Amino acid sequence: MPRIPALKRKHMDSDQKNIFDRITSDNGRIGFGPAIGYAYSAFVWDLHNLSSGHLLKCSLTNSQVRIISLLTVKHWNSRYPWSAQARTALGAGLSSQIIESINKGVTPTFETEEDLSVYSVTKELLTTGDLSDDEFQSATKILGYKRMSEIVHTIGHFTTTGLMANLVGCKPPDDAISRLECRN
């Protein structure tokens, strides 16, 4: 049971109802997970859903978005998003070995130089808040500025997801395909 109750449509203001109606018409997430918390602020809810939509068509591949999502929610010790993103990552083509390597904090073996660079940039940004000159130069050659910019956006998106899930008190489902190995 989450710490924050799911907001019912009848208790929403007009802005919240408009967003609720738009999201439900798009088959979006309402009333569970971090969406419980977003519903309390129409502006935040709307921005987060727009950001989610962007990630479906950005310059990063779906599997690269999932590499970033897994690293980010792991960084924030977010169990519910980990389970959701692990399932989505499998659907995006990441192997269970890559998912569990990230879970264990071990650098996975990637098939492409681009995926390894996305992993390395994300890991260093989450660890240090910046990139070394060497990592920046390498990533610039492999990924270019646009994808590097979208890595930062994706980290921000999943930081919001992870922290909201933690605030709400979301728990992974019993049938989760992967459970986050949290740090103490």
Image: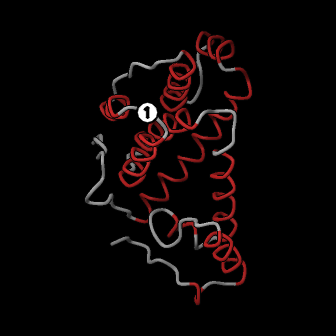
Q: Is residue 182 left or right of residue 157?
A: left
Q: In this view, does 184 lie to the left or right of 140?
A: left
Q: Nearer the viewer, residue 95 or 127?
A: 95
Q: Is mark 1 on a helix, strand or loop?
A: loop
Residue 123 higher or lower than 7, as above or below: above
Picture quadrant of residue 104? top left
Picture quadrant of residue 47? bottom right
- Quarter of the image for the C terminus: give it: top left
Q: In this view, does 97 lie to the left or right of 15?
A: left
Q: Which of 14 and 85 is in front in this view?
A: 85
- Name the colouring of the figure: secondary structure
Say which amino acid is labelled 1: Leu
Q: Give me the residue at 72% from left, 83% from top.
A: 14
Residue 155 higher or lower than 173, as above or below: above
Q: 10 Å neighbourhood of mark 1: few (<14), some, or many (≥20)?
A: some
Residue 154 on image: x %, y %? 60, 41
How many numbered discs sit on the rendered protein? Answer: 1
Residue 129 higher or lower than 47, as above or below: above
Residue 83 higher or lower than 124, as above or below: below
Residue 42 on image: x %, y %? 67, 71
| Residue identified by numbered label 1 | 94
Q: In this view, does 127 lie to the left or right of 180?
A: right
Residue 65 on image: x %, y %? 56, 37
